[in-house]
Amino acid sequence: MLKQLRNKGQATIEYILLFSFLAFILVNFVNSLGKMVGTSVGSLGYALTQQLSVGVCAQYCYYDGYQNKGAQ
């Protein structure tokens, strides 16, 4: 009886260790994934801002057909 009780306790501890290890890995994975997505969205936002801010340069624009060329 004592040996059977000891085995149940050992299995419980093994499961707790296994789940805590998996939780640690999952938290780190989600954290790094969040940083990667944040960096990607930031880079995409910057690129879109650069590409979509048309006609705001006062001089030396690559394309001269803008309607609002800015202050001259």
Image: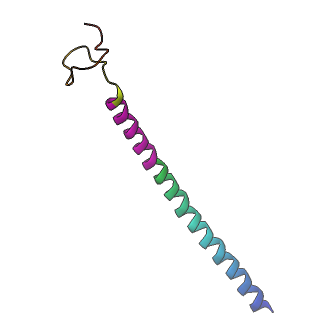
Magenta part mainly helix, strand or loop?
helix
Q: Nearest the camera: 51 or 28? A: 51
Q: Is residue 48 above or below residue 1?
A: above
Left or right of 6, for residue 49? left
Q: Nearest the camera: 31 or 51? A: 51
Residue 60 locus on image (x, y percent): 18, 18
Residue in view at x 34 percent, y 36 percent: 47
Name the quadrant of the N terminus.
bottom right
Badge count: 0
Left or right of 44, for residue 59? left
Left or right of 33, for residue 68? left
Model colouring:
rainbow
Residue in view at x 25 percent, y 7 percent: 72
Residue in view at x 57 percent, y 67 percent: 22
Q: Residue furthest right?
A: 1
Residue 58 locus on image (x, y percent): 25, 13
Q: Is residue 71 above or below residue 55?
A: above
In which quarter of the view is residue 6 placed?
bottom right
Q: Is residue 52 above or below residue 55?
A: below
Residue in view at x 50 percent, y 52 percent: 31
Q: Residue furthest top?
A: 72
Left or right of 4, for residue 29? left
Which region of the structure is painted magenta? Answer: 36-51
Residue 11 locus on image (x, y percent): 68, 81
Residue 26 locus on image (x, y percent): 54, 61
In which quarter of the view is residue 63 placed?
top left
Q: Is residue 6 magenta?
A: no
Q: Nearest the camera: 20 or 3? A: 20
Q: Is residue 47 magenta?
A: yes
